[in-house]
Structures are given as structure tokens and as C-alpha cells.
Amino acid sequence: MKSRKSSSKSPAPPPALDGTRLIAYATLDTSIPYAGRGSIFAGGKVLGRVARLALTRSGGETFVAYCSQAWNVRAMFGYPSMREAKGSAERHYPGVSRRWRHVRVTQRQVDRYLRAVWKGLECSFCDRRPDQFEKMVARGRRVRICDICVREISETMSGEFAGKPQFRA
Ligand SMILES: [Zn+2]
């Protein structure tokens, strides 16, 4: 007889936050105090209380994401383990440990989501998404090239190949 619907009217978190895979999330309300005052910075400014926390993973690191109600990431910090990430979140928001809701998000779901988010903004040469490179140069609306391709191409075009026409796929 457990059909209690979630009382929160907030949207569910997306499968990825800033390109990292969602593991768990927590909704913060006033019953959870904010003990991290003045200790978290976002873009050079002190970050105050947030409405949501998420635990995510990427490249073997676990992240604590401090998010707005609509799951916009305000600040994100990486930890070597899930235990340390949870410990840090608990120090900032005592009691949040009881609130974590774990979700099962596969890498495929993450990729599908990120492809949709970045659709039309991929590198024209390698098809990488903007979350997979640092910089991009665009010419008009249809041709874009990422920094990784620029490096590869500039290596191909210089050095031992200089002067001789080379054709590479
Ligand atoms: Zn590229």
C-alpha cells in the first residue's frame, strides 16, 4: 500500500549534469540546514543555499553538484570516491545523507541526452560534441571545427609533410 506520489513539484534531474552521469540526487528544504556558508564559490562569488544536490560520476571521479531548482549547476566539485563526495555534501548540508535518491542512468542514456542537448553544434570534421572539446571555430552557421581537429590538421599540414600534397580522410 505504498503509492505516495512524490510531493515535490520540481522537475526530475536530467541524466547528465555538466556532462557527468547522474548517480543520485537530493531535494533540499528548510529542514536541512545550510552549514557551508561562505565556503562554496561559484564564478568568484560566494554561493548561498541551493535547492538541489546531485552526485554524479565522470572519468572515475565522483562529483557533488550544487544545483538550482531547475537543475542548473551552480557549482561542482570532484572527489576520488563516492564516500568522500557524500561526506562533503553532508558537511555542507547536515542531514542530506538521508535524502539521497539513487537512480540508474546508463552511459547510453547520457550519450543520447547529450546528443540531443548539443544537436547541430558538433564539430563538422569529427562529430565531437561541445562537451568533448575545449574550443571551436565556426565559419558561418554550417562549418565548425574543434581544437582537437585543428591540432591534428595543423600537424598534418606542417612538419614532414610540408610542401608535399597529402590526403587524409
Ligand atoms: Zn573535431
Image (spheres, grey):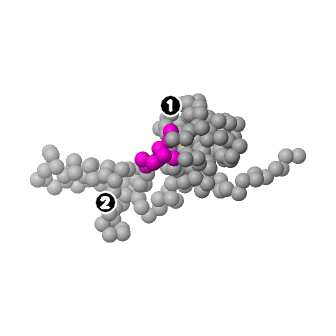
Identify the mark at residue 80; answer none if there is no mark: 1
Query: In this picture, which residue range is highlighted in magenta?
Result: 39-47
Q: Residue drawn at (42%, 61%), measured in percent from left and top? A: 121
Instruction: Please name the residue shown 61% across and 48% down the image.
Output: 52
In-image side of 72 versus 159 (left or right): right
Is 128 left, or right, of 60 in this rendering? left
**Picture coordinates of residue 137 (x, y %)?**
31, 59
Q: Is residue 111 above or below residue 59?
A: below
**Residue 62, placed above or below residue 150:** above
Q: If you read the primary sequence from the N terminus, does the residue marked by circle 2 or circle 1 appear first?
A: 1
In the structure shown, which secondary structural element does the residue marked by tag 2 occupy? strand
Image quarter (top left, top right, bottom left or bottom right) of the C terminus: bottom left
Number of residues whose C-alpha sits closer than 10 Å to that of mark 1, classed few (under 14), some (14–19) or many (20 or more): few
Front residue (pair 113, 75): 75
Which callout, 2 or 1, points to the residue nearer the camera?
Answer: 1
The residue labelled by disc 2 is: 137
- Looking at this view, is 91 or 156 the one in front? 91
- Judged from this view, the residue extending furthest toward the left is 163
